[in-house]
Amino acid sequence: MAGMVQEEGSSSVTSSPLQFFSLMSLSPGLGSPYPWLRELKSEERGLCLIHLLVACANHVAAGSVENANIGLEHIAHLASPDGDTMQRIAAYFTEALADRMLKGWPGLHKALNSTKMSSISEEILAQRLFFELCPFLKLSYVITNQAILEAMEGEKMVHIIDLNSFEPAQWISLLRALRDRPEGPPHLRITGVHEQKDVLDQMALRLTEEAENLDIPFQFTSIVSKLENLDVESLRVKTGEALAISSVLQLHSLLASDEDRRSSPSASKNSNVAHFQRVFQMNQRTLGEWLEKDLTTGYSPSPDSASASASSPLSLAASPRMGSFLNALWGLSPKLMVVTEQESNHNGSTLMERIMEALNFYAALFDCLESTISRASLERQKVEKMLFGEEIKNIIACEGVERKERHEKLEKWILRLELAGFGRVPLSYHGMLQATGLLQSYGYDGYRIKEENGCLVICWQDRPLFSVSAWRFQR
């Protein structure tokens, strides 16, 4: 069989070793029992990794530790954190799957992680590198600032609440735009929320210096708090201020504060058996086609998740913490609130739903970096490991309040915000033009911005990755 596989696999993807996957029995042992795997071309290796990952994930979801362990051993021969896109993705997904398995032995898991240091400063570094290397946050800031400028036209006292205040570039740009208003700049107050005092101190220093240089009356107020612990009363909105709220990749974390209501990972077993078998027949597509078509349309969610669809207000009733927070923000009567969120559903009720969504979403993000930054770049490696890798691990390995990365799609945020009493503010064509101009000025190829129900969606190629929506207080 091995000789025949090698001969067949030497030509093309259509006659690759993938056609024999349904016949391959995963067996333990040192070294790969299929040495020809190492000889595959990049595209063929990528397809093998996808199939192996899905098979291994099904074993993890079904609680089959022995088979999952064998799968991880096979993947280890192909995956690499400094290889091509699919090798890198596989490295971080297998780490997440292994971490989830280890949590079945709490003592072992704690012992292996007892000396690990989780550094907030490393998280901030990774976020800043993401801001520099990819255009997504830049685009969000440009669109948000334009919406604020339009909403605050003619206002003399403007108060902005930044729910994740770590990057001064956004507000420096806004300060310069406000200086150039025909009616002159307003008195601007920014309230920054962050769990690290040092980060807020740096924000205050940098923005105050810029405001003084531009001769704009300015005040920065710091609130040291995690978002889930934020007392909205401490934001102290004053009478006469026109209020704007900016939330960039923050709101989804509040969903973890609610009591965990998800079914156990093993509940996905039966609903994924058919998919598991079908996966191995997909040997005539390229890696990109498989990720685009099969992971988005071929996977059928479980009945549980289908019943909690985004179109049903009942699906939101089990998120009282989120509802309470949004109601509190509504009570501040904001003239504008701009929300940026990941455009993917990583909050599914079963493990396999989250894995399939995450494979699609992070494949696109890794592909972005692959297209613009060399594999040897230390900055790129930091973003992949400290940001993407940690998010993947949180989505796959964690449950309950531990699972913070509960990304949801725009349609669900629209429903949630409307239920809280907010009215949608269509983002202007001018904001879209500015964002498109930014992409052109930086030479970012492959990115697109499209309008959807008055909101803007930022895409890599045709894959939506982030959404930006604007809202206002309404009675």
Image (cartoon, helix red, strand yellow):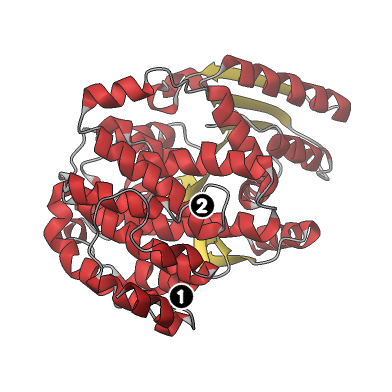
- What amino acid type should be assigned to the residue bearing mark 1? Glu
Q: Position of residue 369 (x, y in %)?
A: 62, 54
In this rendering, the answer to whether 75 lies above or below 421 is below
Which residue lies under the disc numbered 2?
Answer: 88
Locate residue 14, reporting x and y percent. Answer: 42, 84
x and y, in percent, of residue 289 in the image: 46, 75
User: Which one is in front in this view, the residue at disc 1 or the one at disc 2?
Assistant: 2
At horizontal 25% and vertical 32% (from top left) the residue drawn is 103
Amino acid, disc 2 = Arg
State left or right for residue 152 relative to residue 44: right
Q: Position of residue 404 (x, y in %)?
A: 37, 36
The CA span between labels 1 and 2 is 18 Å
Q: Residue at x 41, y 63 (%)?
A: 35
**In this rendering, is residue 52 above or below 287?**
above
Task: Classify mark 2: residues with Cα within 10 Å, few (<14), some (14-19) or many (20+).
Answer: many
Secondary structure of residue under mark 2: helix
Residue at image mark 1: 289
Q: Identify the residue shown where x is 49% and y is 69%.
A: 40
Is the residue marked by circle 1 packed among few (<14), some (14-19), or many (20+) residues within 10 Å? few
Query: From the viewer's perspective, is residue 449 above or below residue 56?
Result: below
Q: Residue at x 25, y 59 (%)?
A: 26
Which of the image's four quarters has the C terminus?
Answer: top left
